[in-house]
Image: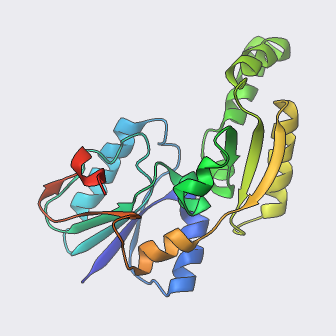
């Protein structure tokens, strides 16, 4: 089958590494970073990319459910396969179980630091607009249920600099700091198969993504 990949730019380093490990040499169409908080635009952009891949029989989506942005996506011509995960962090953790171990933590990856509007950007904006005392008060309240900032190290990009950045952020937000290893295995399986229903959602042609597709 002729296969294309639609990938989130936030995962660009990891997707490139996984492609090298699996020998993937198919076309990649990118969703730009920064759309995770704009799920309607993320959905619209993903649908346009799917529609543009008319010459392919299978389309792989390298992204998570991402605030239900995949709901309502329609494939009129190709099989659509994407990971059964809530977001990119779970994808890079390798499983929902591992992600659940750190449920009171705020995650950063190389891609998030490079291309997304993180809580650190929000903090800096608040300091600039309202002053540091107000910013600390606001974020102490926002983050009262969090215990740490975690750098999810997938060994892609300048991980030493990223780790230092996340430690700096944790210090300013008065949270603990951890560095844990991520994995490319989920992405590698997405690129090469097999796609077991426990880990992937498989949508046949001429189908709209709906709640029923998430029942294993």
Taking 22 as reference, is 82 left or right?
left
Taking 171 as reference, is 195 left or right?
left
Q: Is residue 76 above or below residue 66?
A: below
Which residue does the image show at 47% across and 42% down from the upper left?
Answer: 35
Taking 182 as reference, is 62 left or right?
left
Tell me residue 66's x, y (percent). 44, 45
- The image quadrant that residue 80 belongs to is bottom left
Which residue does the image show at 75% across and 12% down from the upper left?
Answer: 130
Tell me residue 195's x, y (percent). 36, 73
Residue 72 visible? The answer is no
Q: How is the image coloured?
A: rainbow
Q: Residue furthest bottom?
A: 23
Residue 28 visible? The answer is yes
Tell me residue 61's x, y (percent). 38, 62
- The image quadrant that residue 179 belongs to is bottom right
Quarter of the image for the C terminus: give it: bottom left
Q: Is residue 1 above or below residue 48?
A: below
Which residue does the image show at 63% across and 68% down from the upper left?
Answer: 183
Q: Is residue 50 above or below residue 146?
A: below
- Picture mark count: 0
- The image quadrant that residue 40 belongs to is top left
Q: Nearer the viewer, residue 33 or 102?
A: 102
Q: Nearer the viewer, residue 119 or 44?
A: 119
Tell me residue 56's x, y (percent). 23, 75
Taking 56 as reference, is 167 left or right?
right
Q: Is residue 119 above or below residue 164?
A: above
Q: Nearer the viewer, residue 44 or 155?
A: 155
Quarter of the image for the N terminus: give it: bottom left
């Amino acid at each position: 089958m002729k296969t294309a990949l639609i990938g989130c730019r936030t995962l660009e380093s990891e997707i490139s590494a996984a492609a090298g490990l699996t020998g993937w040499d198919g076309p990649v169409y990118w969703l730009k970073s920064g759309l995770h908080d704009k799920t309607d635009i993320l959905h619209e952009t993903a649908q346009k990319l799917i529609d543009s891949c008319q010459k392919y029989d299978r389309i792989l989506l390298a992204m998570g459910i991402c605030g239900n942005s995949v709901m309502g996506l329609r494939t009129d011509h190709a099989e659509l396969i994407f990971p059964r995960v809530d977001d990119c962090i779970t994808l890079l953790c390798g499983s929902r179980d591992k992600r659940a171990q750190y449920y009171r933590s705020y995650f950063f990856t190389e891609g998030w630091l490079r291309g997304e509007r993180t809580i650190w950007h929000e903090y800096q904006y608040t300091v600039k607009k309202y002053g540091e005392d107000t910013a600390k008060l606001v974020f102490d309240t926002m983050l009262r249920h969090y215990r740490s900032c975690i750098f999810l190290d997938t060994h892609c990009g300048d991980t030493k600099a990223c780790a230092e950045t996340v430690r700096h952020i944790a210090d300013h937000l008065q949270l603990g700091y951890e560095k844990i290893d991520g994995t490319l295995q989920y992405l590698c399986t997405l690129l090469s198969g097999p796609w077991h229903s426990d880990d992937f959602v498989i949508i046949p042609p001429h189908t709209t993504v709906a709640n029923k597709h998430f029942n294993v």
